[in-house]
Image: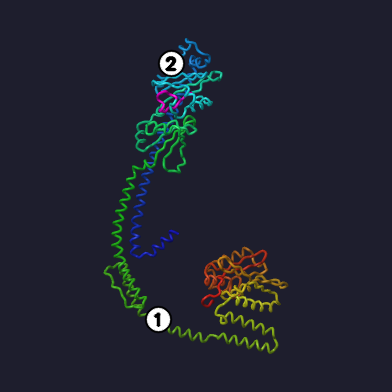
Amino acid sequence: MIISTIRRRIGEMKLRNKLMFSYFVASIIPTIVIGVTIYHLSAKSVEDASREFASMYISQATTNLNDFVDRYNRSTRSVLLETDIMDILNKRNPLTMEESIETQTMISRYFGRVSMEYPEVETVMLVSAGGTIYHYTKDPDKVNTDRLLEQVWYKRIQESETALFITPVHDKSYYGKSKDDATFTVGRILRNYNGSYAGMILLDMDPAHLINLNEDFLMLGNRYNIKMIITNDEGELIYHSDGATGKTAWKDIITDKYFADLSGTGKANIVLSKDADDGRLRIITEIPLKNLLATISNIKHVTIWSIMVFLFFIALLSILFSYKITKPVLNLRRSMKQVELGNYTSLIQTPLANDEISNLVKSYNKMIVKIKELIEDVYLAGLKRKQAQFLALQAQINPHMLYNTLESIRMRAVVKEQDDIAEMIKILARMFRHSLGKQHKHNLVRHEVEYAANFLFLQNIRYDNRFVLDVRLSDRVLDTSIIPLVFQPIIENSIKHGFHNYESQLHITIEEEFTESGDVLIRITDDRFSMTADKALEINELLCLSDSGGMYQSTDEGNADGGIGLYNIAERLRLQYGETYVLRVRSDEEAGTVVEMRIPLQDDIEGELS
């Protein structure tokens, strides 16, 4: 629809505007294509390079994260080898003063070794089987054990069956001073050799210590707003580069869950993901395309400005060249208008140039002179030809002579009391009068029915009344105009192809059906199955072809003796009424062979239908 509208608008443009438009299109489209291609290739190159960098860095981060998990898996498991510590955790009876002092000494010594070996650990906590909590913090702070026991993550650990665990980032509300800070906890459920619960060890650390970002990533992260996120298998945040670098406060993202969109449908970010710790942890890298492509946006701006400047020069040149080209064409058009009015003396001044348009003007002037010379000869020849045609028309047989002759023969038969012969001649005269088109200026459906009935009358005399015609048409349809000689050829086909058994009668029905569009569907049916469905389909395909044997084909498969065939009827319907009004054939298992034609339901059609 849009393309056809554009083509129509271009077709309506003047030649000068067409030339200008073609200059624009021929010049601007390559420029736009080149600019867009360069921009997209640059964007693709930057995107591929960023993907490669992010992929390498996420692989390195995955290795570091696996090393982190292995390291703390060994460190927390080493508690099981500390027999003194395990004995302290397994004690459930109240301790004496000496046992309490000794216990504190051994635990402090253990905490000292852990803090020396793992300087990134901020707090070490041991929880005994009886619920006693021992802790050590580097900063002068204190852990509120009651609040610790109320933490959601702590309750989840107690219900977990996993030995080593890493909690999501959570607040320090169970601390005394640093309540607004964030931390994550690495720990292990401690069990005795017999599998009984002995307690647990908890290590609180700053989330920034989980992954050490190198200088390259920090520089690119600040420049392109690249994010690195670590979550557990439930999508809970363990690490976020924005929180670790201070871009975003931990309290704003501490309770968020994150699930990476790896489908690529949004096209807003480049998202890469990789699993660590056997799938229990996931590292995700996000690179915003908007920030990434901002560095090459200058190419787009330069391209746009170049196109605008180029447009200005193209417009200037196209106006100058189109005027120079179209001026002789406009002069030629004015002269042709004069020729249309009958003025053959209007010649065009020949341009000085020796190009194609100049040669066209010269040829045009010669043509006008030649036309002027030939007009008189053609005019005289036309007068002579019309005179010859008039004489030929005078020599044609007068149809009235034929009518009068048939009437004389009929009267002779009446005198001889040959009533059957007289009736046959009377009917034949009516048919001749109808076919020669002198009785009715406008042909109606009523006349077609009468002509078909007369035809069957003559056939019944020949075949001993073997044909029955049943007309089921209303007066409205009978008084509708139609092209002549339509029903009789169809009925003749029915007799030729459907009448084989001389012992039975052939019933032919003409009925009507009104359509929603205000037309009428006239259906001619015979009760013999003379046509297969495949044959009907083949005939219909031929009837749909406007040049398959219409006005210029007087015979067809169904009427091989020189009569008017189905192709001729279909073509005349199409020429008279349009492509909507067609002729169709079908084979009905219950009714027989059916021929349908669609015509407009009108009371009068201007002009003589022939």
State the SS at label 1.
helix
Residue 402 seen by the camera: yes
Residue 496 seen by the camera: no
Q: Quadrant of the C terminus?
A: bottom right
Q: Where residue 159 is drawn, which disc sits there?
A: none
Q: Where residue 108 is drawn, which disc sits there?
A: 2
Q: Which residues are magenta?
A: 174-187
Q: Residue at x 60, y 77 (%)?
A: 447
Residue 182 is left or right of residue 439, and the answer is left
**Image coords of residue 181 (percent x, y):** 40, 28
Q: Nearer the viewer, residue 305 or 41?
A: 305
Q: Is residue 373 above or below residue 119?
A: below
Label 1 crowding class (10 Å Cα cut-off): few <14, some 14-19, many 20+? few
Question: Magenta span has 177?
Answer: yes
Amino acid marked by disc 1: Val
The first of marks 2 and 1 along the sequence is 2
